[in-house]
Image (spheres, grey):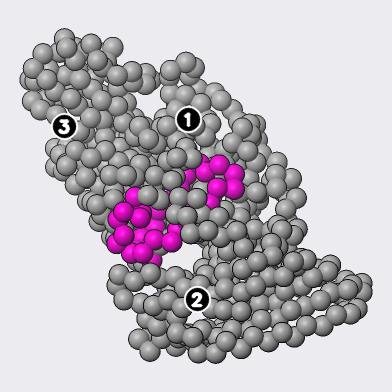
Amino acid sequence: MHIVFNLFITFIVNSMVLSSHLGPVASETGQLKNVKTLTIDRMVHLAAPGPNDSRYAYVPFEVPSGATRMKVSYQYERAGGANTIDIGIFDARLTNSVSHPKGFRGWSGGRRSEFFISRDEATPGYLPGEIHAGTWQIILGLYSVAPAGVDVSLKVELETGKGVPSTAERTITKSEGASSEPQRAKLNQGGRVGKSIRWWRGDLHMHTIHSDGDWTVAELINSARERGLDFICITEHNTSSHHAEIAGAGSTLRPLVLRGEEITTYGGHANAFGLPAGTWIDFRVTPKDVARISSVAAEVHKVGALISINHPFGHCGGCSWGYDSAIQNFDAIEIWNGPWDLSDELAVKMWDKLLQSGQRITAIASSDSHRSNSPLGQPTTSVGASNLSQSSVLEAIRRGHVYLTSEIERPQVRFEAQPESKPRLRRTIGDEVYAVAGETVLLLIVVNGTPPDATTSLISNGEVIRNFAGQPTSPIRIKVEKDTYFRMEVRDKNKTMLALTNPIFVKVKRTLRRFLARVPEASSF
Ligand SMILES: [Zn+2]
Ligand SMILES: [Zn+2]
């Protein structure tokens, strides 16, 4: 037995207790089974990490062949909240490869003080399966550590023989998979056909018992269906254990459910949307390590998924975004997380500054629901796509065909633009409109379902250029001289956001002819 030393672990006691017993024991179901239990006790001291230090510590232990179940528990002095230590585990297949991490078996953050893994079932957040012989590693995440450091005591109980479920909490079984999914309504493709798009309403950020939420996967999907959402993405903190409960992307049932992961570092959170089943994204990024978070974004893109910056001004410890210069590698930014507040206001400002600098990143909104008191779809992200499929939803986000509303059904928003004399070139949110310098662009702004004292603002290059009281319906004309963008915000009388669109970009040149030759194909509507 050995223990890894790094900068932050000072070994105090390595008291390995091999209390093994062999013989008939009574299980909870009253059956007698031959179970051999090996108990390993450890104590580690974690020093407070410096600002540039890794925030992860590893505690290795040996698993003999023939193990069928393991239970891990840990304790430490919380010191009135000064100490918070997260936990997870890697199995014997762990490698040091950054691009192909192996052996991940689960993560529960600070939610649980114990978990188990067996061949057929596991605590939510953990992956059931073979208990490989060899060196496993408990990973401890240093969310917060008091200046004096913290002692953490760990206990691993390994069973060989027939395992006995010992937790009263609902567990996840390997065979559960799609069979546990509730009946969902058939997807109605509806809308227009061909290249035309229609707007699909979704929520891209939520949690279940697989991380720190109270929903089960089935409850979440049921709620989304009842509330009329077309798609959702389930984004657990740092684990993929919920993927097995989500039917394949080829499912024709509504809501469309995307697999996600909230890559939760101690220097900011990022969501991956549309991961292949079972794909886990390595979250072990040291705060401010821009190169490492950029390689995480590249890994997400490599598997065909998208990555967003979450709640960049989030209130909780480690929730604010700390990798600014990596933003160019991200597809989207969550500028609206749950009920509108000052942190969202700051996020919109940050996003608009990016737009002013010429960077295109799609604004999205999410409930970040953890339980039923935070309803799904408040706020809602609507995407413009020709059909409701994972690839269409992801492509719509990539292209900025996205607007955001405070509720699923309202406000209703329409925002389109065209050079005044060329209706054939009318484009929608996320598109580019091509115009000649001095040409007039016609902007169609329609808003319904708002309180009478709401205000709609048209914004360009960081400035509000027009305000409309009530519910605007008529087009406005603006002469354009240089490249710009137009976007729309709708707020109530207290300035609380009710709706926000991504921009329509206007590209301006001296002559239109050479432009038209290379106008990219845009969505018609
Ligand atoms: Zn988060
Ligand atoms: Zn979250």
Q: Which residue is more in the foreground, 408 or 320?
A: 320
SS type, badge 2? loop
Q: Nearest to the eye among marks 3 and 1: give it.
A: 1
Q: Is residue 468 visible?
A: no
Amino acid at pointer 3:
Thr
Q: Position of residue 521 (x, y in %)?
A: 33, 18
Taking the spot 66% from the left edge, 77% from the top edge, the residue there is: 156
Give the Cα distance between marks 2 and 1.
46 Å
For ligand 1, tell me if the residue under mark 2 lies within 8 Å.
no
The residue at which mark 1 appears reads as 392
Image vertical order of residue 226 relative to residue 368, above or below: above
For ligand 2, tell me if the residue under mark 1 lies within 8 Å.
no
Amino acid at pointer 1:
Ser
Task: Give the quadrant of residue 7.
Answer: bottom left
Q: Choose the circle earlier in sequence order: 2 or 3.
A: 2
Taking the spot 23% from the left edge, 25% from the top edge, the residue there is: 443
Image vertical order of residue 371 relative to residue 181, above or below: below
The residue at which mark 3 appears reads as 484
The residue at which mark 2 appears reads as 4
Q: Which region of the structure is painted magenta?
A: 266-294
Amino acid at pointer 2:
Val
Q: Position of residue 119 (x, y in %)?
A: 74, 60
Image vertical order of residue 16 relative to residue 55, above or below: below
Image vertical order of residue 487 relative to residue 50, above or below: above
Taking the spot 79% from the left edge, 70% from the top edge, the residue there is: 160
